[in-house]
């Protein structure tokens, strides 16, 4: 379906390596007033200034002042960052009827391609007043029941899920020219299920879960580190218990979108929606 996975994945990975090597920080001379001013304003003590090079091109703008803060605008010309998506397309007749199986296949391919954190997903939540918010979380396991991640039950995301359990997940597997969006309802998993996962976490991560009142304001990093020391002393003997404010959510999907990049922005998009009989209807979406 995707040609020879080994060859095409290597080609795509090469593209990204080459591309990444063209984007690099460049040291600027100390005599450059503009960069020194911006560096001082941002509290940066070195003479490094954020000049990106894209190939041999370089675009430098003067700094612009905004409410007393100098914004360094000498970034690459972002509009020039464009690539053609050349890998194989996604055809309707080759899709698996079950989106969980389709996801599993793509997830395995993302792992085989050795992408950085293939299980990283953007979780979008919204408050009762529809104010959206996003962040990265790690998928820990999935099956036909749903997609499970772990977090602090008093965090901002948790508060939003309490108010409004409708969420979206996004896997952006860019070197494979793919993204998968999952729409669903988030529910807390049982304490027993959270405990099962908590006990296999590294000890440092277990202690970390105890220390962080996630999403609240803290006055310094030192406070966090002191809390870590205190918790480490408290639980120095024996197993670390599961914090009551920490655990998993399962996102139970009602929609999946599989996106595959194609040339000329004529990408392939297929949307699976769950029907009343628990079968999935598949429709092609316009790119
Ligand atoms: C690669 C990556 C993985 C992350 N994984 C998790 C995770 O699994 N659970 C979690 O609570 N936060 C994770 N975070 C931190 C979140 O992105 C976020 O900062 C934190 O959960 C607080 O979000 P909130 O204030 O919106 O609730 C991760 C961040 C990154 C960059």
Image (tube, rainbow, N blue to C red):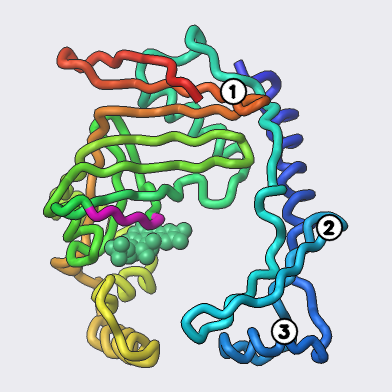
Image quadrant of ligand 1? bottom left
Residue nearest the observer in this picture, 65 or 186: 65
Give the x, y percent position of residue 157. 25, 58
Range shown magenta: 131-136
Give the x, y percent position of residue 138. 39, 52
Give the x, y percent position of residue 207. 31, 75
Q: Among all residues in the image, which is located at the extreme right? A: 56
Rendered image quadrant of residue 205: bottom left
Q: Earlier in the sequence, mark 1 or mark 3?
A: 3
Q: Nearer the viewer, mark 1 or mark 3?
A: 3
Q: CA distance from mark 1 to mark 3?
A: 42 Å
Q: Is residue 186 visible?
A: yes
Label 3 secondary element: helix
Q: Earlier in the sequence, mark 2 or mark 1?
A: 2
Residue marked by disc 3: 34
| Main secondary structure along the magenta-highlighted residues | strand
Instruction: Establish if 192 lies above or below 38.
Output: above
Name the residue located 29 percent from the left edge and 16 percent from the top edge.
280
Q: Which label number is shown at residue 57?
A: 2
- Position of 287 with respect to 33 (left or right) is left
Rendered image quadrant of residue 63: bottom right
Q: Residues within 10 Å of mark 3 (few under 14, many from 20)?
A: some
């Amino acid at each position: 379906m995707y040609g020879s996975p080994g060859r095409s994945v290597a080609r795509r990975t090469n593209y990204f390596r080459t591309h990444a090597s063209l984007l690099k920080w460049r040291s600027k001379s100390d005599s450059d007033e503009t960069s020194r001013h911006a560096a001082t304003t941002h509290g940066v003590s070195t003479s490094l200034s954020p000049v990106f090079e894209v190939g041999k091109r370089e675009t430098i703008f003067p700094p612009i002042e905004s409410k007393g803060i100098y914004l360094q605008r000498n970034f690459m010309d972002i509009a020039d960052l464009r690539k053609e998506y050349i890998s194989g397309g996604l055809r309707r007749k080759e899709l698996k009827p079950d989106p969980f199986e389709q996801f599993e296949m793509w997830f395995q391919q993302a792992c085989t391609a050795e992408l950085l954190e293939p299980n990283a997903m953007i979780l979008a939540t919204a408050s009762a007043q529809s104010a959206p918010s996003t962040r990265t979380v790690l998928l820990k396991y999935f099956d036909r029941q749903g997609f499970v991640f772990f977090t602090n039950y008093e965090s901002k995301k948790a508060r939003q899920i309490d108010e409004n359990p409708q969420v979206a997940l996004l896997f952006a597997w860019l070197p494979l020219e793919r993204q998968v969006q999952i729409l669903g309802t988030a529910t807390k998993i049982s304490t027993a299920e959270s405990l099962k996962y908590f006990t296999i976490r590294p000890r440092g991560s277990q202690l970390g879960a105890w220390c962080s009142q996630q999403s609240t304001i803290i006055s310094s990093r030192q406070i966090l580190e002191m809390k870590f020391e205190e918790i480490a002393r408290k639980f120095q003997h024996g197993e670390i218990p599961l914090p009551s404010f920490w655990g998993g959510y399962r996102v139970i999907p009602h929609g999946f979108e599989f996106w595959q990049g194609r040339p000329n922005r004529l990408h392939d998009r297929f949307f699976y929606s769950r029907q009343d009989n628990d079968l999935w209807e598949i429709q092609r979406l316009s790119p």
